Image (cartoon, grey):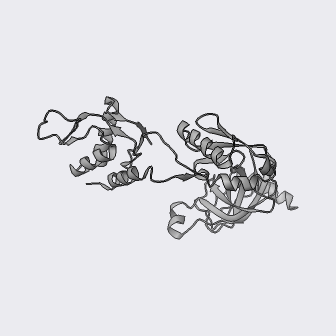
């Protein structure tokens, strides 16, 4: 009998509201984010594990040789070369000359990038401009990982930032905070906490996701110092009563606010009743208080020998019946 996912569920339920969270863990600030860049390149030096020719590789090699002053007349075909897509993420406030990691993924018939070297590859943003240039030795990890995923590799520090994204963050007059998990209660608490700590009406919650903040006069052109203070404010975050179920693995994760209304459940050899008191029930029913939380119900089902598959079916039936107060999300 598999009970590990059930135990995991109980622990998470009890820990859901254990302490306050830092503001930096609840929100992200507008303008402070990563930006993806992408490019097409060639990996050379493979030991016969490359694409072995093809229109894309051949035309790419011809253009490369022409730039190097060579003019090959015959078709170029080599199993030591692979065509790849190169991706990376520009960090917030990335500066010219800063190094970033890049991921290299084969798009041709290559069966391994092990031992290869990425040639100079421009990386472009969504606006078509080049923001970084990548090159370097490709690593596909340890031997076992290399055998399992040999067509994807990493070039550590393989790209150099060549263009900056101008934000002028320190000159901002206002800041927008966006909640990672939209919630009206949490947004209102963030507004209240900021205004109390800064001693004025500087923040206002626009909706369940957005809190706008006016930079106080004494922090203008000192926005970095203000951000350092803001992100360490402690806030009691709230969340929906939700159960997340992964049917493929049998994993169940839920918040402690999920409750069960009075109901009787029969599933296979299991019989359980959540009852508010009153008449006695048959011996085959296990009685629980009407204010039962989901974690208490799981404890009882665990004692009866329920499997994760049993729990998934029971929770879905309880939700459809209206006895489970909360949202179920399948992933």
Which quadrant would residue 51 be assigned to in this image? bottom right
Please tell me how many numbered marks the rendered image carries. Answer: 0
Which residue is drawn at the image coordinates 61% and 34% (left, top)? Answer: 207
Which residue is drawn at the image coordinates 16% and 40% (left, top)? Answer: 285
Would residue 255 be found to the left or right of residue 135 on screen?
Answer: left
Which residue is drawn at the image coordinates 54% and 52% (left, top)? Answer: 21
The foreground one among 58 and 160 is 160
The reply to whether residue 282 is in sight is: yes
The reply to whether residue 51 is in sight is: no
Q: Position of residue 149 (x, y in %)?
A: 54, 60
Considering the image in quadrants, where does the N terminus appear?
bottom left
Q: Position of residue 274 (x, y in %)?
A: 24, 38
Q: Position of residue 72 (x, y in %)?
A: 82, 59
Up/down of 308 relative to 206, above or below: below
Would residue 285 be found to the left or right of residue 301 on screen?
Answer: left
The foreground one among 323 and 194 is 194
């Amino acid at each position: 009998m598999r009970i590990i996912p059930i135990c995991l569920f109980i622990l998470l339920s009890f820990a859901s509201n254990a302490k306050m969270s830092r503001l930096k863990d609840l929100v992200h600030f507008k303008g402070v984010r990563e930006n993806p860049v992408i490019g097409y390149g060639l990996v050379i030096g493979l030991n016969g594990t490359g694409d072995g020719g093809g229109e894309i590789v051949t035309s790419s090699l011809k253009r490369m040789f022409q730039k190097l002053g060579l003019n090959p007349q015959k078709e170029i075909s080599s199993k030591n070369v692979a065509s790849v897509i190169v991706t990376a993420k520009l960090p917030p406030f990335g500066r010219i000359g800063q190094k970033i990691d890049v991921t290299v993924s084969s798009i041709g018939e290559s069966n391994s990038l092990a031992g290869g070297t990425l040639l100079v590859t421009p990386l472009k943003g969504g606006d078509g401009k080049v923001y970084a240039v990548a090159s370097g030795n490709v690593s596909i990890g340890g031997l076992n990982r290399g055998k399992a995923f040999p067509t994807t590799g990493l070039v550590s520090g393989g790209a150099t930032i060549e263009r900056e994204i101008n934000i002028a963050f320190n000159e901002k007059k206002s800041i927008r905070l966006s909640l990672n998990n939209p919630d009206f209660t949490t947004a209102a608490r963030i507004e209240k906490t900021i205004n109390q700590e800064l001693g004025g009406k500087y923040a206002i919650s626009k909706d369940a996701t957005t809190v706008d903040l006016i930079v106080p006069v004494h922090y203008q052109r000192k926005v970095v110092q203000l951000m350092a203070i803001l992100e360490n404010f402690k806030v009691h975050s709230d969340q929906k009563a939700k159960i997340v179920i992964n049917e493929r693995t049998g994993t169940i994760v839920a918040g402690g606010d999920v409750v069960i209304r009075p109901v009787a459940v029969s599933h296979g050899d299991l019989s359980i009743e959540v009852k508010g008191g009153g008449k006695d029930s048959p011996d085959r029913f296990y009685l629980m208080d009407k204010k039962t939380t989901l974690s208490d119900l799981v404890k009882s089902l665990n004692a009866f020998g329920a499997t994760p598959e049993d729990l998934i079916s029971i929770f879905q039936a309880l939700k459809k019946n209206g006895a489970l107060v909360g949202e179920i999300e399948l992933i």
